[in-house]
Image: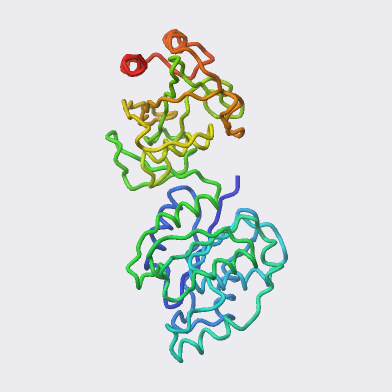
Amino acid sequence: MDLKKVFMVHCWSGNSNVGWYPWLQKHLENNGVEVVALNMPNPDTPSIDEWVDTLSSSISILDEETYFVGHSIGCQTILRYLEKQELTNIGGILFVTPWFSLLPERMDEESNIIASPWIETPIDMEKVKQFTNSKYAIFSTDDFYVSIEQATEFYKKLGFCCHFVENMGHMSFEDGIECVPEILLMCGKMLGFELLDEVDASGHPTGRVLDKEMMHDRGILHREVALFLINSKHEVLMERRSPNKRFNPNCWGLIAGHVDAFESINSAMLRELKEEVGLEATFDDLLLFDCILHQSSNRNSCLSYEYFMRCDKNIEDFVIQVEELSEVKWVPFEEFKEKSLREDETYTFRATKENIEKLEKLERLVY
């Protein structure tokens, strides 16, 4: 498989060694992505020709493994580079605080002279938007250079999926911004990664954020959640996993999933509940009753946070996530317990010492 390559273009007056750029580069490289963090010429007086030529000279092949991350005027540089290229499929684009125009109240005479060509020289939007369907943009609600209305422009003209963060200014080194979790998460989405926090045995993040598949391949410890959804008949809701799942395809298991990077375990559990079976709940509905360490050097290693919740709902009223599941059913708790203890091959549950202790705790909650 070809190596994914990200070209990163900084903002006006910036360089690749300031702000959140080194932080993002480190995390992407940890995930096996090659990052080309450019330093553009004359950053205090950026010109279209100089910046586009610099980007162009750095790229030998433009293909589906090519990705772009731009910040502010760096976003314009990427657009203007692409409009000059032969149309082809690229991997994706992530823009941070992009703009077609700037708020006039923060612009002095010198800044207006520099910005004028970037604002007035048209871009072939129809051509640029055809390079990829994977286009994301992040805006700050209190950006002092870029109006929030610019998000509408990028959506309408180029089809960008826009995301908003609260009170982060222009997200530049001048704002003292050195990391923005939303940028990394959006970058992961663009690259097709499911990013998780590496954690220690106590569940505390180590600071390393990696793709789920890399976690699994290397037995790296991360967090997962699982839910015992129990009805008034003392039945457990079971899900049949999709046949294309990496682990336990076609087997019966619980509502469960991974805790995303920067996500709390409660939020992850509520998200999985909504995604997998279409059920809305609140933190108060959940009871965290156990946490189990599963550790292996060559397969899934995780801290599994076990939740309990009461629910009386007819099977036909659940809305299942067809990409992950094929069906759901209510199973009497005693049947679930019996099949789990004898390690029925159609069940994901394994009768380890920790899981047997978990069943004992669970039984007291069920009855």
In this view, 182 is above or below 314: below
Q: Is residue 56 left or right of residue 223?
A: right
The x, y position of residue 359, in whole percent, is: 35, 15
Name which quarter of the figure residue 210 lies in.
top left
Of residue 236 and residue 137, the one placed in the foreground of this image is 236
Q: Quadrant of residue 16?
A: bottom left
Seen in the picture, residue 337 relative to 265 is either above or below; the reply is above
Colour theme: rainbow
Q: How many marks?
A: 0
Task: Say above or below: 332 vs 3.
Answer: above
Picture coordinates of residue 295, whole percent (x, y): 36, 27
> What residue do we see at 33% from left, 48% from top?
207
Q: Residue at x 44, y 18 (%)?
A: 349
Where does the image place residue 214, in percent across and percent down from the top left? 47, 39
Q: Closer to the camera, 219 or 343? A: 343
- The one nearer the camera, 103 or 51, is 103
Q: Answer left or right for 288 relative to 65.
A: left
Residue 174 versus residue 311 in the image, above or below: below
Q: Residue at x 41, y 63 (%)?
A: 21
Quarter containing the N terminus = top right
The quarter of the image holding the C terminus is top left
Query: Residue 145 at x, y = what percent?
Result: 45, 76
Which residue is most to the left?
202
Residue sitting at x 59%, y 57%: 92
